[in-house]
Image: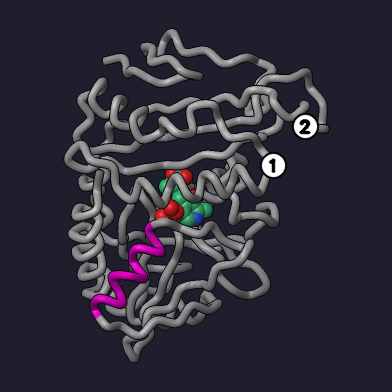
Amino acid sequence: MSRIVFVNGEFVPEEEAKVSIFDRGFLMADAVYEVTTVLESKLIAFEGHMVRLARSLGELGMDKPEWMDDLLSIHKKLVSKNNLENGMIYLQVSRGVADRDFAYPASGTPTSLVLFTQAKNPLDNPMYKTGARVITVPDQRWGRRDIKTTQLLYPSMAKMMAKEAGVDDAWLEEDGYINEGTSNNTWIVTKDGKLVTRHLSTSILHGITRKAVLRCAELLQMEVEERPYTKEEAANASEAFFTSASAFVCPVVEIDGHKIGEGVPGNVAAKLREIYLEESMKEAV
Ligand code: PDD
């Protein structure tokens, strides 16, 4: 069944949605995006995603889309027009349409805004039960990973390296430390029960789920260290997991062929996932 999508102010069937071939999102990957989860037809952590969107636009000196103040109502209309119970909403903003030039077009050039839904239920992902297996690969992305841009070619390449290696994902390593996964923030649980996740900087995306899971850890009175860690530390941890809007908290059971802990999904990840879902639903809009 065809989806209803939003393109520059209009809700249209996906077959009718059009953007220009001169859109800078297409020509230059001059675009940012957000992914918001929908559970029971409600938006999870909506405000956090919109705050990060505003930050991404600001960091790139991109004008706010004309519909910036209507984004909640646009998201909600997409949910209802598509009868979306559980799934995702993707929002993409580009710097707009201009003749091809490396320099930005004049300020005031209208940005392009598109939103679309994906009906895949994130709760159905079998990896929560099996745990994910990952490999490490060099992090060859650009230096501003804190901005959520649509330049996703290297993460796609890394995902393909994982697929070719017969595993589920790749963890991106730089200067001997793990930054994050191809599309998630990564965590380990040390043998003495501490949660470790890389500190915020321009090296990683400042995950909205990461922030919520840190709050859950506080509720559970867990000790947390925000610092870099190596793949060796991850391989010797008692548990590992990753977080993202679409995966929530997902256990990782193997890294570069080494079993992590017992090689099965751990209790800390399971508990954090449970609390995360509970807490997120309380604040869902
Ligand atoms: N990815 N790190 C990277 C590189 C990501 O692409 C993502 C999200 C995250 C987690 O951020 P959040 O918790 O805000 O979803 C971390 C989304 C889900 C995607 O591109 O599909």
Q: Is residue 275 magenta?
A: no
Which residue is drawn at the image coordinates 21% and 45% (left, top)?
124
Horizontal side of 132 relative to 232 (left or right) equals left
As displayed, is residue 50 above or below residue 28? below
- In contact (CB < 8 Å): disc 2 and disc 1: yes
Q: Which residue is mark 1?
A: 61
Instruction: Looking at this view, name the residue that lies furthest to the front.
Output: 69
Instruction: Looking at this view, name the residue that lies furthest to the bottom.
Output: 192
How packed mark 2 is, by other alpha carbons closer than 10 Å (few <14, some 14-19, many 20 or more), is some
Horizontal side of 164 relative to 87 (left or right) equals right
Instruction: Looking at this view, name the residue that lies furthest to the top.
Output: 16
Task: Estimate the spatial distance between the alpha carbons at disc 2 and disc 1, rounded to whole Å.
Answer: 10 Å
Which residue is drawn at the image coordinates 23% and 30% (left, top)?
84
**Mark in the foreground, 2 or 1:** 1
Q: Quadrant of the C terminus?
A: top left
Total numbered badges shown on the rendered structure:
2
Disc assigned to residue 104: 2
N-term mark: 2 or 1: 1
Q: Quadrant of the N terminus?
A: top left
Q: Position of residue 101 (x, y in %)?
A: 82, 26
